[in-house]
Amino acid sequence: MGVRPDAANSDGRRALLAQIEALSENLDRGRTALETSRIDGGLRAAVDSCFRNRIASKSKELEILQSRTRGATRLEAYWGGFRQLQKECGDLLREVLAFLEGALMRSAGLDADICRIADALLGELDASTDIRWQRFTIMADRDLFVGMSEIIRISFPEFSVWNLPVAAHEFGHLVAEELHRNLGRDPFGEILESEGKKPEAHGRQILNEFFADLFATYALGPAFACTATLLRFDVGDAHRRSPTHPTAAERMHLVFKTLEKLNQLHVAGPYSGIIEQLRQLWEGSLDAADQPPLEAEVARQLDSRLNQLYELLDNAYSEARYASFSRAWTLAENWQAQPDELTLRDVLNAAWLCRLRDRGENQTIGRKALKTCFDVIDSPGRQSHRPGMYPLEV
């Protein structure tokens, strides 16, 4: 004997209401967790309104769904609405968890203060782009930028200057978002259409990664190219494409070409020696790993993309371009300079200059560079980036 339709509907309503209630309680738990006194007040203040407003908004949507479910005769659409809310709340609570983990780690001093340097570095980039980034960095399992909270993750446990340039790549994703908003159009979609391709999500994601690499090279100069060449990209799998990222070979081609463009802006060609050295390292590594070079046609297409992306960046954020490499050269000679005359970008470039020159001294160079970074951040009169230093906008 089958279940009567009205009984089945009643059971379905009961199950849906129970899941709505459980999800609402999870949001309440997330809100309560954000109140912990164990997190530095400045970090919490930087994201408190963002998270609380989003939690309140989702709680209200659940209340509305709950009310409508009680009076509904057919539940199919309400189950669909709940599944969508469940996904959105899951994304939100995962971001809350990531914040709690990273902020607790920072508050306990377990990041060796590397996040304070990363905050200050991105503060320099923020000042040069006028994006008014209101957040901060935390340690996580990988380097990542999430637009929901704008918190930038840097890889645990890389407590050294060598990985810091990757934070500029993640900041580049924020710059890309801001560029789209300011232009009022879809420049990445336009690039794809100019290539005869549909402006689909995959193509946009690939362009977004290229743009972030471009920005990091543009804003940091050789420092990002050095990190990418020696530490970040998998030479043994240089031509593997993922659903969200270009191949390592494609990315290195774009980074080198960007550095060449920047080098051509100066008669002296200050980056020439570094470009040659890094190219030799990359190409030698490819050969040793039995990986072929980039195909000529692929390189040609990448050059066309780079020209369009570079023009977008240079027209909108030319003040972000790194332009004090001579200070890095001077600092690399003896590490004796007035901190208030330096930027963190100078220090990172000086560190890489020394590492390329003085092989086998990486730890010593790294310690000198870290000390200089803290001297720069703490120098009198420097306006460092502080979490929550701008009015919050949600």
Image (cartoon, rainbow, N blue to C red):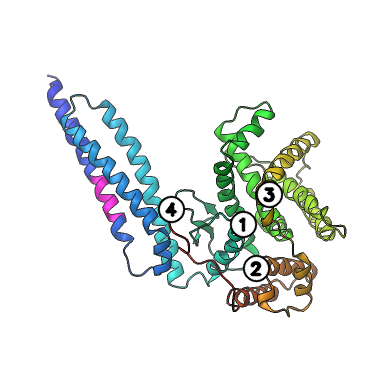
Q: Looking at the rendering, which quadrant does residue 330 occupy?
A: bottom right
Q: Is residue 271 above or below residue 16?
A: below
Circle on res. 344: 2
Which residue is the extreme one toward the top?
1
Identity, as a three-letter code, of the amino acid under mark 4:
Glu
Mark 1 residue element? helix
Answer above or below: position of 347 versus 238.
Answer: below
Q: Amino acid at mark 1?
A: Ala
Crowd rating for badge 4 (residues with CA inside 10 Å; few <14, some 14–19, many 20+)? few
Find the magenta span and give its range: 22-30
Please report the residue visible at 61 percent of the width from the left and 59 percent of the height from the top: 125
Q: Residue at x 28, y 27 (%)?
A: 77
Q: Which residue is mark 1?
A: 168
Of pointers 3 and 1, the one earlier in the residue sequence: 1
Q: Position of residue 88 (x, y in %)?
A: 37, 42
> Can you tell which of label 1 and label 4 is closer to the viewer?
4
Cα–Cα span, label 4 and label 2:
28 Å
Q: For marks 1 and 4, give the CA distance.
A: 22 Å
The residue labelled by disc 4 is 393
Q: CA distance from mark 1 to mark 2?
A: 12 Å
Tag 3: amino acid: Leu
User: Could you say where residue 310 lies in the image, as x and y percent from the top left?
Assistant: 71, 45
Q: Residue at x 48, y 59 (%)?
A: 135
Kindly identify which numbered label has been placed on residue 214.
Answer: 3
Q: How many marks?
A: 4
First in sequence: mark 1 or mark 2? Answer: 1
**Quick check: 345 left or right of 325?**
left
Q: Quadrant of the N terminus?
A: top left
User: In the rendered structure, which disc, 1 or 4, sits on the residue that comes first in sequence?
Assistant: 1
Going by the numbered disc 2, the residue's amino acid type is Leu
Q: Which is closer to the viewer, label 4 or label 2?
A: 4
N-terminal of the pair, mark 4 or mark 2, is 2
